[in-house]
Image (cartoon, rainbow, N blue to C red):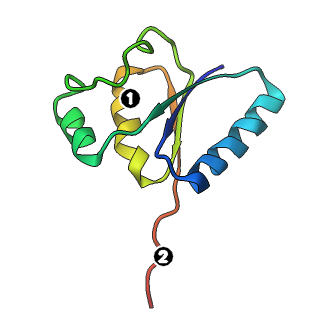
Amino acid sequence: MNILWVKDGKLGHEKQVDALLEEINSTQHIDITEIKASTVLNQILELITFGLLSKDIDGIENIDFDLIIGAGSDTHLKILNLKRRFKKAKTCLLYTSPSPRD
């Protein structure tokens, strides 16, 4: 299974994804490719230009990913943009929405 991991550089988020990937790896062989999520402004520009401004996927565009995974809100737009390019891939975003305040 080919997995593309979108990282935001936050240790807690990386630990969450790492734990999930360890569980997946216990049942099947996985190959992981990692990329860093760009700034929110760059992700928005990438989204509205349908990926024409995307520069961080050089070298991975020929890989058939089965899963695109990330954690945290900073990876959400990037995962959406990557889903446009890798249409067959499933996506997984580990995210907890903010709790309503009393």
Mark 1 — residue? 82
Left/right placement of residue 42 relative to residue 35 reads: left
Left/right placement of residue 7 relative to residue 82 reads: right
Is 102 located above or below residue 40 in the figure? Answer: below
Disc 1 is placed on an element classified as helix
Is 25 located above or below residue 11 in the figure? Answer: above
Crowd class of label 2 (few under 14; some 14 to 19; many from 20; radius 10 Å): few
Residue sitting at 29 percent across and 23 percent down?
55
Quadrant hosting residue 20: top right
**If the image is split into quadrants, where does the C terminus sit?**
bottom left
Residue sitting at 58 percent across and 52 percent down?
11
Residue sitting at 27 percent across and 25 percent down?
54
Mark 2 — residue? 99
Q: Position of residue 10 (x, y in %)?
A: 52, 52
Q: CA distance from mark 2 to mark 1?
A: 28 Å
Q: Position of residue 101 (x, y in %)?
A: 43, 85
What residue occupies the far bottom of the structure in this picture? 102
